[in-house]
């Protein structure tokens, strides 16, 4: 096991000045922040050394988390509970970096992959409930910790720039995929335009709706708390729904090389939609409901275009295991997009049925 430095113990004491810290050790599978389990005689806590390379605005990020968790707590919802420093701050600025602490939520587990449709339904229910509890929250008070995160028109501008630059002469190896994106560029503005003209409400968005960001009860496997709130920002609920479908309703891994194995699973879409829409049906607008199928298409097209742009630019953003890894990833996303297009009517019928229309 990795050595835990005295700096970690010192940081923990700043959050728990009146407690005896008996143990600090690495914990969990997160890749962004350094996560540590802090033990005292009475309770356990999660302390994280924050990654300021990816999230330089620690103050804005923690302000977002405090706003949202306070709102959830006031409604009696189980959520992350921020532990403040000995001088009343939600994070610690230490000599070796920034730290934060949460109370440990006992008797919970996380799932790394969608094992069956019931688990995916529970995931949809959890993120739908998260949206519902925050439906009246003023999202405009939140800081945009990663500007233009789901600004798809901007992502497409970046893609076109990467194609035009063709820095490594790779465009000739993927002209079919480039053409696939180029022919759909005019379709990507609906959500950004709707947010701009007010026809789509500005809401709190989680922006990392992976299954392992839900703590499930260790006994019942019912969802208890949504975690990893670092990417909470103002945006559209359609981003969260669409991205969940992008990865959760695919029959294959994101980097499957055999495209015959890559399909959009309409049954998984239905399971997630039943969970998510079932929770938000009292707060979702007609426009949002209409665009739920489109959001799956949009988030998948956006992700594929980002993989392809990175491939053309020398694969500097997404970690890769071989030279064409990002091209393979792009191809899986585009295979899904093509099947989304074929299933728009079926997806819309499923949403209408759930909403009782």
Image (cartoon, grey):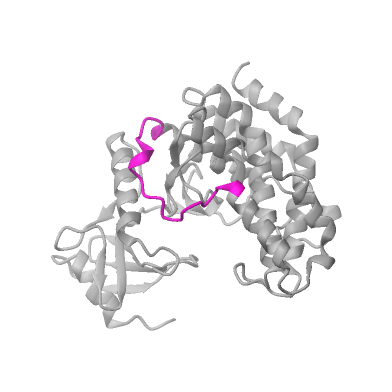
Asked if 129 appears above or below 115 in the picture, the reply is above
Provide residue 248's location: percent of width, then percent of height: 65, 47
Asked if 209 appears above or below 288 in the picture, the reply is below
Asked if 4 appears above or below 197 in the picture, the reply is below
Asked whether, in this view, residue 217 is left or right of residue 112, the answer is left
Asked whether, in this view, residue 179 is left or right of residue 159, the answer is right
Q: Quadrant of residue 116?
A: top right
Asked whether, in this view, residue 291 is left or right of residue 328, the answer is left
Question: Looking at the image, which residue sits at the far top?
Answer: 357
Q: Magenta stretch: residue 151 in it?
A: yes
Provide residue 112's location: percent of width, then percent of height: 57, 57
Provide residue 161's location: percent of width, then percent of height: 66, 60
Q: Magenta stretch: residue 280 in it?
A: no
Main SS, magenta region, reads loop
Question: Looking at the image, which residue sits at the far front?
Answer: 164
In the image, 330 versus 69, the foreground residue is 330
Which residue is drawn at the image coordinates 76% and 55% (left, top)?
Answer: 332
Quadrant where the C terminus sits is top right
In the image, 135 versus 169, the foreground residue is 169
């Amino acid at each position: 096991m990795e050595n835990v430095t005295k700096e970690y113990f010192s940081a923990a004491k700043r959050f728990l000045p009146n407690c005896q810290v008996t143990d600090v050790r690495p914990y969990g599978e997160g890749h962004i922040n350094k996560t540590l389990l802090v033990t005292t005689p009475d309770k356990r806590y999660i302390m994280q050394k924050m990654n300021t390379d990816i999230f330089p605005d620690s103050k804005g990020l923690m302000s977002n988390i405090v706003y949202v968790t306070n709102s959830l707590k006031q409604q009696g919802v189980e959520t992350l509970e921020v532990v403040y420093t000995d001088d009343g701050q939600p994070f610690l600025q230490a000599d070796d970096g920034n730290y934060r602490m949460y109370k440990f939520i006992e008797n919970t587990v996380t799932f790394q992959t969608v094992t069956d449709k019931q688990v995916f339904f529970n995931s949809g229910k959890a993120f739908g409930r998260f949206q519902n509890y925050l439906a009246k929250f003023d999202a405009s008070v939140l800081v945009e910790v990663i500007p233009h995160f789901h600004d798809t028109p901007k992502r497409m501008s970046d893609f076109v720039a990467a194609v035009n630059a063709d820095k490594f002469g790779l465009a000739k190896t993927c002209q079919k995929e480039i053409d696939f994106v180029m022919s759909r560029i005019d379709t990507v503005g609906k959500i950004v335009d709707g947010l701009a003209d007010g026809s789509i409400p500005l809401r709190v968005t989680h922006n990392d709706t992976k299954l392992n960001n839900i703590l499930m009860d260790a006994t019942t496997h019912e969802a208890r708390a949504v975690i990893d709130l670092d990417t909470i920002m103002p945006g559209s609920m359609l981003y969260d729904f669409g991205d969940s479908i992008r990865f959760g309703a695919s029959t294959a891994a994101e980097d499957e090389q055999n495209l015959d194995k890559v399909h959009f699973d309409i049954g998984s879409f239905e399971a997630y939609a039943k969970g998510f829409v079932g929770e938000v049906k009292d707060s979702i607008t007609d426009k949002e409901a209409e665009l739920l199928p489109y959001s799956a298409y949009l988030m998948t097209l956006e992700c594929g275009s980002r993989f392809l742009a990175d491939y053309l630019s020398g694969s500097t953003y997404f970690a890769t295991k071989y030279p064409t890894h990002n091209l393979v990833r792009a191809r899986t996303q585009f295979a899904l997009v093509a099947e989304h297009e074929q299933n728009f009517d079926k997806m819309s019928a499923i949403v209408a049925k759930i909403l009782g229309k």
